Image: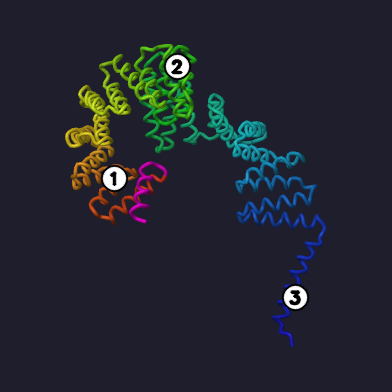
Amino acid sequence: MIRPALLQTFFRNALILLALLALILAPRPAAGYWDSRQASRFEASGDYAAAAAGYALAAQRLPWQPSLWEKAARADLDAKEYSQAEHAFELADRYHALSPDGYVGWGDCAFALGKVEFALERWNAQLDQAGDPAALLARIAHGYQALALYANELQTWKRYLPYQPGDASAHYRLGLLLAASTPDEALPELMLAARLDPGLDPSVESLRTALNTATLSDDRAYQLLLSGRALGAMGNWDLAAEAFRNAIGVRADYAEAWAWLSEAKQQQGQAGSSEIAQALAFNPDSAMVESLYSLYLERQKQPKQALAAMQKAAALEPADPGWQMALGEAYEQAGDLISALQHYQQATEMAPDNATFWQALAEFSLRNSVDLAGTGLPAALKLVDLAKDDWQSYDLEGQILLETDDPDAAETALKKAVALAPAQAAPYLHLGILYMQTGDRAAALADLDVAKALDPGGPAGWQANRLLEQYFP
């Protein structure tokens, strides 16, 4: 006698087989509807690749529902399968089945594939269709940024902000764009950005001083030059280049602006050769031009010529300690450490209360192991005296103390650096090295791990990782 449970199992399996057989033998429409329902379930569960495949299959089986191609495209977009998404968007458009949101998604897909102009066409075409265009305007602004069309980007952010007045990042970006074009209008946007997001305050403060100085002058070209230099110091070399180009637009023969434009281009991986040549042609007796020319020559692996250019810069402005420090760097690059030391020391003698020059002298001594006890350590101690709240002062002191065989004092200095800047990797790296040298493997491992975690893609993290791999496999 067959048990009821076995009968239930048999009938259930039979029904499943019949359902599968029905699907196999079903006409295309029935299979297409089933594909669409399955795709919807996959999409709801977050399996976007499977959803895209399901929607595409359903679209092939249900040609009178071309809107399924848009669903396939959107699922591919969510799965970051941009080439497949592009094909699906094209099919939906071919059958006139793309919704306004679909055109926006098509633009997103094109942008991800690097087809920025096409993306902008799609987004701009939908602006009149959107009730709240804020999301589209943000996309358009980023598109113009990618194409370095900064004037267009600036106007787009101005259109966007009335819809999203609390967007700190948009105010900040607009402030940077204004700094590169109309520096006297930049500060209100930057200050508002810092109020909305206090995390932006350090960046805004670094620009604030330069912009305030710039606006003291009535010379618009000079304003743009100072603003561009401040943008470059922040790492925004693309906008710095725009500021220098705008300065040249105001005064075509502005040699310093040409020289800084060369530097900005080099910072972005471009040659900058024609710009520095233009700067030298306009004013060969500018110390700033000669110093930037020296940097250019140094990058061209011409240390002797770079040294000659820096010597000329220093000779043009002999009372400026900054040129003495730069001349020390040039001698160092040329391999003349004795002359380099003399010029680093001369900079500190000319400006004994300026921490920058003492730091440069201490770093030179440490970097080259030149008279660490007699020059490097006193320079580091003077630096600590002048910049007590700067973690780098104690980090540098600790490194030199370790090199001069005073590990206890080095540990104290490095721990002070950590206390001042617990998010900086370098002091942890140097503490790790100290503990390795003193035989405290547990402490070394702990600090090297922290350095690696804090700076995974930077030099301190890289060095910490190398030490961990070599000594703590």
SS class of the residue under badge 3? Answer: helix
Number of numbered discs overlaid on the protein picture? 3
Tell me the crowding category of disc 3: few under 14, some 14 to 19, or many 20 or more residues within 10 angstroms, Cα based.
few
The mark that comes first in sequence, 3 or 2, is 3
Q: CA distance from mark 3 to mark 2?
A: 88 Å
- Residue underneath mark 3: 11
Bounds of the magenta span?
A: 457-473
Residue situated in front as seen by the camera: 29 or 445 = 445
CB atoms of marks 3 and 1 within 8 Å? no
- Residue underneath mark 1: 430
Quadrant into which the N terminus falls: bottom right
Residue situated in front as seen by the camera: 354 or 160 = 354
Q: Amino acid at mark 1?
A: His
Relative to 73, say whether 161 is above or below: above
CB atoms of marks 3 and 2 within 8 Å? no
Residue drawn where x is 32% and y is 28% of the image: 333
